[in-house]
Structures are given as C-alpha cells and as structure tokens.
Amino acid sequence: SMVPMIIKPHHPRASEAATKYFLMQTTASALILVTGLLNTWQTGQWALTHTTQEATLALTLALMLKLGLVPGHFWLPEVFQGTSTLTALVISTWQKLIPLAILFSITTSPSTTVLTLGLLSALVGGWMGLNQTQMRKLLAFSSIAHMGWLITGLTLNPKLATFTLLIYGINTTTLFLIFIMTTTKSVADLPLMLSRYPLLTKSLLLSTLSLGGLPPLAGFLPKWFILDTLISKNLLLMATLLALASLPSLFFYTRLTYVATLTQPPTTLPAKHKWRLSTTLPPALATLTPLIFLLPPLTPALLDSA
C-alpha cells in the first residue's frame, strides 16, 4: 500500500498527505464498486466492457479522482508536497497503471467526456504550475498536464496511449531521479546544480525540454501524434486548444532549464566548477537519459509492435 510509504518520514505533513491520499483513493474505489454493482444489476454483466452510459460516466469520474485529474485533481499537489520525492515518483508513474487500464476498458473511441477532461487537465496542470516554486508541487501539476495528454491519446488510439505512457515514464523518472540525487526541493536550489553536478544539470536540461515537447527530443513525438490523430478525425478545435494548453507547461519547463543552466549564485572562486565533483551517473540515469534521443528514430517500430 502507498499509505505506509507516504507516512514513512514521520512528519505532520506526511501524516496529512497520507490521510488525504487514503480518503481520496477509498472514495474513488467505493464509487467504482457501487457503480459496478449498479451496472451489473441493470445489465446482468460483470464485465466492464458492458456498461450503461450513466455507469461509464460515473466510472470515468471515479478514475479521474484516482488519477488526480480534473475535476478531482486538488489532492495530488498536496500529497506530493507532504511526502518524499521517491514516493511522489511512484505515485506519478506506477500507481497510474491500473486506473488507466480500467479507463481503457470502459472508454469508447472517441469519448467526448474523456476528451474534454483531458483538455481541462492539460489546461489546469499548465496554468497552476506557472507560479509554483516548490519542486514537488510543480511536478504534480506537470503530472496532471501530461495525464491530460495521455487520456486524450487513450480514447483515440490504444497504441498511441501506450507510447505516450512510455515516453512520460522515461522523462518523469529521469527528472525525479535527478532531484533525488541533488536533494532539490525548490526552484531556488537549482542555481547550485551546475557547479556541483554538471552532468546531472545536462540531464536535467534534456529531460525538462523533452517534457515540454520540444523537437527533436522524445517528448515531442506523443504530442505530435495525438494532434495529428485529432486533426485526422476532424477535431480541429480540440487539437488547437490542446496545442495551446501545452504552452504554459513549456514555459515553466523552460524556466527550470534557465534557472539551472544560466543562473549561478555569487562565488569568490575563479573556477567554474567546484574542486570535488559528483561526476558519476547512477545506472538508471545513465540508461534513461540517452533514450530521450534514441527513441525518436525507433518510434515507427514501437508503434507498429505496440
């Protein structure tokens, strides 16, 4: 269970975060169970692939609460801020797999409800992340925005959703591991990274720009394919709004890159870097960072085999 992991720091904020997480997840789970029972009573089928329109809507809202997406997104930043960075990484990646699988089984293609909630999540995640200075809260709103893109791709093409989830997992894991290694808690800690961790700063540059969706990095490809699919289905307004919704997220990713690479604190030493450097990369980062460049040429093969 995630509750012991969240409460592990033995801090009042961790206890508060664990309570919020427990209440939100149990509420969503109870709603899923009640909706499933009512749907079985109406249809005589236990399978989630046979759901009424009302049951599908209720299940979708319950899954949005579980995933931390609009309209049930308010608990996610508070839980991220109250727990450790490693636990926040698990919540933002691994804990989203089962709700996404359930959402895939009940979603028709394309679903107006899921498309609307995906657009709202991308908008809210981008706009609410603009003024954040605490790194874990900023990553929470980043997760909300990217999950908006992901559920949009989920209702359009399952292969595209799988590819989007893969790219999101690689970029997010890379960014979280960097912040864990450098013990970065806020934006104010970023200017110290270049002098202490030059290699990690370069990895931070690549991962943030990839999350922002800039070409030729891997994060550009899922957004490009999702927009292309929307246009091919004549959803031009949806594609335009979703593209505009990515701009606030791109802004705060670019701000992180600027603060980490082009801003340095005052120093009395003539040397650019400290004498003792932590130059070694952990195996996970050494593997994930090159994938940001290597995945774009492999994209056709990944989509064909998905």
Image (cartoon, helix red, strand yellow):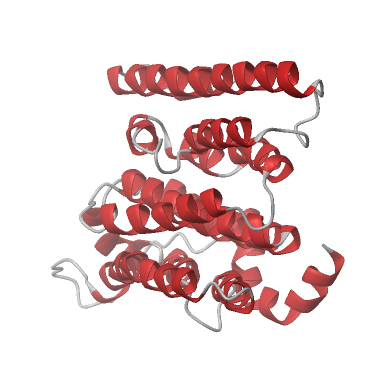
Q: Where is residue 9 in the image (x, y as percent from the top left)?
A: 40, 22
Residue beneath the point at 13% across and 68% down: 266
Quadrant that contains the C terminus = bottom right
Residue beneath the point at 43% across and 73% down: 243
Q: Position of residue 175 (x, y in %)?
A: 48, 56
238 sits to left or right of 153: left
Above or below, 96 against 288 in this view is: above
Question: Which residue is most to the right?
Answer: 305
Residue beneath the point at 39% across and 39% down: 73
33 sits to left or right of 22: right
Instruction: Choose between 162 and 219: the one closer to the eye.
Output: 162
Instruction: Choose between 180 and 295: the one closer to the eye.
Output: 295
Question: Which residue is most to the front?
Answer: 42
Would residue 116 be seen by someone viewing this image from the given angle? yes
The mark total stands at 0
240 sits to left or right of 184: right
Would residue 8 be seen by someone viewing this image from the given angle? no
Quadrant that contains the N terminus = top right
